[in-house]
Image (cartoon, rainbow, N blue to C red):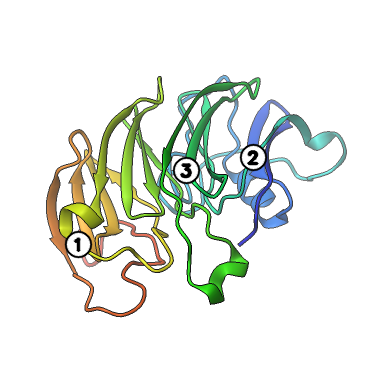
């Protein structure tokens, strides 16, 4: 994990890619989510991409990451964050922690890098002293689906934003609603958006939420106790022996 300080947009032969600089591995991953501006159907809509595999099928990539093959199209200052960028509807969405108090979501125009909107809320928290050196800023990567952006905040909250305006559609506070403890290291897991639902590892459990309303549809695998109170892994949906 790296304390990323700014976001950049890299241009490669009629393609666009997005990476947090200072991390070569992220630069490589960002190339995998490159998209022609003319082809708005290709989105990097959530953690590790639309299928959470780290891949986009049938995507032509540059053969080199130097010289004329790849150039910086734009860049923007960015606060500390462990979250990855999300690309959808002609915008790049990022999250960051500011002043160790606010969690901030910014939408950038994919072509120009100009901010389209910015939304923030109070939500930062301190992690245990032995983890302090690794930072206490926002960790989870957002998920996009059907015009909504689902953002997990450190204090075990899930915020649904309208991607056109940045307005908050609904906000789920798992600690308050489920009477659970604040996770020791914050909300780390990245939400999964799938077929009208959002799957999260929050509230000391796994929850399926209605993407439109934020209502909890079901809750399972409740935490048995301990220090963490939350998950570090992120969910995926798979077909195993014909069962999904």
Task: State which mark lies toward you, 2 or 1.
Answer: 2
- Residue 64 falls in image quadrant: top right
- Percent x, y of residue 244: 20, 58
Using the image, tell me which numbered label, if any, was put on residue 103: 3
Whether the residues at callouts 2 and 3 have beta carbons within 8 Å, the answer is no
Closer to the chain start, of discs 2 and 3, is: 2
Give the SS element for disc 3: strand
Disc 2 target residue: 78
> In this orientation, which residue lies closer to the viewer: 54 or 18?
18
As displayed, is residue 12 above or below residue 1?
above
Going 77% across and 33% down the picture, which residue do you hit? 72
CA gap, disc 1 to disc 3? 40 Å
Residue under numbered circle 1: 242
Give the Cα separation between the discs numbered 2 and 1. 44 Å
Asked if residue 127 lies left or right of residue 161, the reply is: right
Q: Residues within 10 Å of mark 3 (few under 14, many from 20)?
A: many
| Label 1: which secondary element | loop
Mark linked to residue 199: none
């Amino acid at each position: 994990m790296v304390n990323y300080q700014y976001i950049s947009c890299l241009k490669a032969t009629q393609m666009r890619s997005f990476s947090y600089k200072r991390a070569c591995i992220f630069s490589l991953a960002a190339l995998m989510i490159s998209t022609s501006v003319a082809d708005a159907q290709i989105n990097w809509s959530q953690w590790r991409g639309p299928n959470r595999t780290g891949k986009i099928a049938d995507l032509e990539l540059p053969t080199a990451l130097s010289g004329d093959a790849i150039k910086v199209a734009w860049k923007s200052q960015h606060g500390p964050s462990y979250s990855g960028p999300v690309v959808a509807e002609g915008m790049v969405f990022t999250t960051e922690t500011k002043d160790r108090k606010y969690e901030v979501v910014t939408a950038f125009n994919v072509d120009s890098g100009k901010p389209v909107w910015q939304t923030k809320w109070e939500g930062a928290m301190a992690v245990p002293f032995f983890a302090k050196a690794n930072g206490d800023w926002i960790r989870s990567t957002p998920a996009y689906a059907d015009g909504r952006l689902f953002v997990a905040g450190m204090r075990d909250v899930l915020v649904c934003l309208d991607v056109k305006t940045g307005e908050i559609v609904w906000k789920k506070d798992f600690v308050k609603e489920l009477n659970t403890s604040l996770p020791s290291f914050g909300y780390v897991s990245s939400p999964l958006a799938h077929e009208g639902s959002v799957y999260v590892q929050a509230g000391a459990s796994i929850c399926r939420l209605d993407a439109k309303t934020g209502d909890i549809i079901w809750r399972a695998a409740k935490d048995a106790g301990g220090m963490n109170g939350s998950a570090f892994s992120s969910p995926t949906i798979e077909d195993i022996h014909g069962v999904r």
